[in-house]
Image (spheres, rainbow, N blue to C red):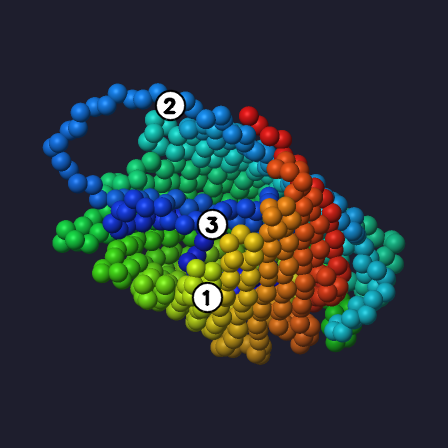
Amino acid sequence: MIVALLAATVGLRAQQEGGYNESVVVRGSYRPDIQPSEKLNFPAVVSDSLGRMEHSFVYSIAPTRLKTLYEPTRIKAARIVGEPTTRLYNNYLRLGMGNYWSPLADLYWSSTRDRLKTYGIRINHRSSWASLPPLWALSGPSLGPLYPYQANQTGVTLFGKYIVADKLQLSSDLSYEHDHNLYYGFSDSILSAVLGQPRDSISTSDYRASYNVATWNFGVSNMQLDVNKLGYAAKVHLSDLWATYGRNEFHLNLSGNVHYGFNIKNHYKGVAYMNIEWDGFANRISHNGQMPLGYGFVNTSSGYITLPAPTDTVRSHRNIVKINPYVDFDFRGLNFHAGFTTAWDGFSDTAVAFRLFPDVVASKKLMKDNLVLSLGLTGGIDANSWNTIRIINPYIAPDADRKATSHYDIAIHARWSISKKLEANAEVALQIMDNDLTFRLDRLYGLENVYKPLYIDNNRFVCGGTITFVNDEMLTLRAGGHYYHYSDLKDDGNALALTEMPYRPNWDALLAADVNYKDKWFFHLEGQLLGKMFGDNGDVLPMRYGVNAEIEYRHNRALSFFLKMDNLAFQRYWLWSNYPSQRGLFTLGLTYTIPHK
């Protein structure tokens, strides 16, 4: 599903690891009026995704001020009786338990009112300690009985922000995350055929993958809101991953940007930016003869042969340097974003390769600003590190090959505000992909349950859209979908026998509804469809369909109860070839908040 979601992202600029880091500058005549705004009314939730991304946008408004020599007479300040301070809710504790013995816990706490500083902590845990039933039937690849089905994700994050002399903002966070899962995609029959052992004779530690990641981020930016003055920001990202089977990956990312406003013929305003980023990785794997269960049993035409487990230590250092200058300006209602990105790719191969990507987007508002048309020619490059790959596919080999994915995108996007309650979005894009990441079973593992990355050059065509209906706060409806077509598939410049991208759906669709009944009852219903995907050995994974729902009752502002129901269609869909899922998952829990004066 994560691969499908990645495939659904089109026409977007490359994202920095660790989340967005964007600066949005709003230009134009200042009008002191109050625009209608939708009330933000949603419960605290826990993301089921391993790759949750936080959004952090800064809006800077620069109205034109007229200079005058007139100084009004000062008026003595009147004494105003302050209103009682409202109660703040700066924390919540969310607890739940699901079938298949699936506990959930999420604790959040932050400081309260303070103009200069903010700090807090977040702790989360979600796991499943289930077993797949010994007998089941499903169209597609047949494996026979499967048993343990375990996964765990636990993390803690400390965060803080401090403003120095109303000029500088310092921000930092420190986090630790522990994940583990099982290479459970094998049956008793294949275990007996390859290793000659029954399942009772092996331990789950023989095919468990555990990951530990420590991360530290530190950022500094000036508090200058006037675009006609110099603004700047810098960020340091450090992460260290250590995992089973002797893996270690140290990641250092340094990034910074400056911007400055300017005038064009004293009539049009623009802002120039310069972004610089260095992404470096140091990897080490010390095999010591330790590999996941089934390594070295290779199936050949004459039967199984065995290979010894490696005992060497392999080290590597890789990096990517990117420089992205661009200019934003407005010309009679036509907005331009014009620039380019230069990149030195020392990640994919031993030789450093120079790459140049366009970064040009033009947009125009029509029909009294109700219709916005955009045309973009963009591109970028991102490193597929061990930490990135294992989040997409947790069943990868320990020594997974790493390359950087680069892309050139031509995209057309239209947003039409049909009415105050109805909005439609449509997009068409052509993406030229280099080293597009997907996966295949690693034939060095006789149990056929371990994957290796597969990097494919291709041309990807995407078209689709969404339509959203919002009726005040009570009802929200969303519907949308995308169609995908891949062509000219190549591996290291050589044409492949594959006609379809492995583990990529050829279409997807979504229908969702949210209902708020008197701020007491909240309902969410979502239906998803994924078209067929091609797995290994020509296998076609069945179309994936799912229905998810959530009900929450708010007893008061401090206490609420929820029921999450996932996979209500009870489909035992395929995550990957040889990896079937559980059926319906139900989680019942509560959220409690301690009011603070």
Q: Which residue is tagged 3?
A: 38
Q: Residue at x 42, y 37 (%)?
A: 219
Nearer the camera: disc 3 or disc 1: 3
Decide which of 247, 271 is in the foreground and name it.
271
Q: Name the residue under label 2.
A: 80
Amino acid type of the residue tagged 1 in the rendering: Ala
Q: Position of residue 141 (x, y in %)?
A: 75, 72
In the rendered view, tell whether residue 185 sits above or below residue 32: below
Query: Is 459 positioned to the left or the right of 247 in the image?
Result: left
Q: Which of 563 and 298 is in front in this view?
A: 563
Residue that numbered label 1 is attached to: 424
* Residue 127 picture location, percent across and down: 72, 47
Q: Which mark sits nearer the N-terminus, 2 or 1?
A: 2
Identify the mark nearer the N-term, 3 or 2. 3
Pointers 3 and 2 in contact (CB under 8 A)?
Answer: no
For the C terminus, which image quadrant? top right
- Left or right position of 97 against 323: right
Q: Tag 1, which secondary structure? A: strand
Residue 560 is situated, as x and y percent measured from the top left of the image, at 67, 41
Q: Nearer the viewer, residue 106 or 199?
A: 106
What is the quadrant of residue 336 in the picture?
bottom left
Secondary structure of residue under mark 3? loop
For badge 2, the amino acid type reads Ile
Badge 3 or badge 1: first in the primary sequence: 3
Q: How far apart are marks 2 and 1 (CA)?
A: 47 Å
Q: Of circles 3 and 2, which is in front?
A: 2
Distance from Cα at disc 3 to Cα at disc 2: 30 Å
**Residue 17 visible in the current orientation:** yes
Q: Residue at (29%, 44%) from the top-left corner? A: 32
| Residue found at x 47% / y 50% | 38
Q: How far apart are marks 3 and 1 (CA)?
A: 18 Å
Q: Residues within 10 Å of mark 1 (few under 14, many from 20)?
A: some
